Image: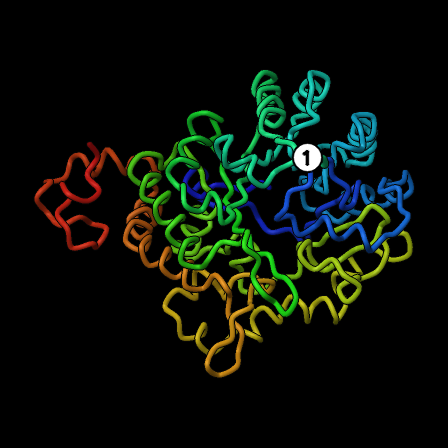
Amino acid sequence: MTYSPVTETHGLVGNRSFQVLAKPTGALCNLDCDYCFYLEKRTIYPGSDFRMSETVLESFLTEIIESHSDGDVSIAWQGGEPTLMGLSFFAHAVARAEKLARPGQRIEHLLQTNGTLLDERWGAFLKQHDFLVGISIDGPEFIHNSHRKDKRGGPSFSKTMRGLEILRKHDVRYNVLCAVSSTNVDYPTEVYRFLRDECEARYLQFVPIVVTGPGRTISHVSVTAESWGSFLSEIFDIWFRHDVGNIFVQIFESALAAWLGLANPMCIFAETCGRNLALEHTGDLYSCDHFVDQEHRLGNILSETMASMVETPRQLEFGESKRTLLATECRYCPMLFACQGECPRNRLTLTATGERISYLCAGYKSFFLAADGPMRMLAQLIRAGRVADELYTLLSKMDPTIMCPCGSGIALAQCHRPH
């Protein structure tokens, strides 16, 4: 939902011992997006009202705040659709968190929402308590409405954009999360410009849709590896030529961290995982947001602490297996430092040796290879203590007839010289 841009800060926020995505409504949502992997999790809790109780809330807040003994605390609310809990729930949660915080300790609340239920009261509340809001928008209206429908099959775009306008009107900090499906993957330029120009978003996240069916078959709403790589590369080219230091795209920031030799801020590209947990409305804690099932249920926070559950041998093995089960093909890949085999949930493709690699491997590899030269330029600039958006000033002062410093082998005038 949120990240610390390398190109803006010259560094990354220090890793916490663990992070938790709290789902106060579980998988309950007022939309029925056909690519959503989480809606089916409702079947885990038959007969539930899908509302986090006061007891679970108190236990969660107490422990997440106590676990951050070395500084500030980020509390992440997700779903389903968390705003279905109502404003009173979040007002109470904010008040309790402030009361539980130690003197001088800052609490930051992060909220991921589809935006359709936001109104003036929500806008005033989110601004008052300085929430960072992630709002889900897949692109222009014809794209957004193709998959993000309400329970009656109706469009959600106008309601989502009304919610975005509420955030902008009240000057609430926000990111845009764009789910990239088989529909919008063919419109990278249109999607990027819409989010940048029409939504006025400075912080963007692009998440590839990979939905599996019986026998690990890939659903028609999923991107292909090749289309995903092309989508990223086309947007990266626009971003690098025009928006470095002004627009922050999570995957580009993550890649730059890898080129700088820093710890990767995205768990899917980290060497190991297992420190980003999912908390259901009942207090059940799971290994990961993408592994909410009985096999990966760690326990319940009403009977065990989150700190103890994250350190169990089973969970440690879960996190370490991202590295230990890395395919031979990945171990010898020149882009391993940037990818680390991607998320285990997407390791669906069998190699000739019977090992599994990411379904998106070819796409990520083509993107990282295409971004290699520009990333080297940015990394060199930042290592020299310069600000990333100085890139354009430096390039404009160079002889346009020399070879572009990105390593393309093309003259600067035909490559990355600002126009």
Q: Which residue does the image show at 50% across and 55% down from the upper left? A: 264
Mark 1 surroundings: few (<14), some (14-19) or many (≥20) residues within 10 A: some
Above or below: residue 299 compared with residue 251: below
- Nearest the viewer among 73 and 58 is 58
Q: Residue furthest left?
A: 401
Above or below: residue 276 compared with residue 235: below
Question: How far from the left and from the top, in percent, is residue 200?
Answer: 47, 26
Q: Coloring scheme of the render? A: rainbow
Residue 235 visible from this viewpoint = yes
380 left or right of 303 in image: left
The quarter holding residue 145 reads top right
Q: Residue furthest bottom?
A: 353
Question: How far from the left and from the top, in percent, is residue 324?
Answer: 57, 75
Question: How far from the left and from the top, in percent, is residue 395?
Answer: 20, 38
Above or below: residue 187 compared with residue 408: above
| Amino acid type of the residue tagged 1 in the rendering | Asp
Residue for badge 1: 150
4 left or right of 384 in image: right
The quarter holding residue 409 reads bottom left
The quarter holding residue 267 reads bottom right
Q: Which residue lies furthest to the front in this view?
A: 153
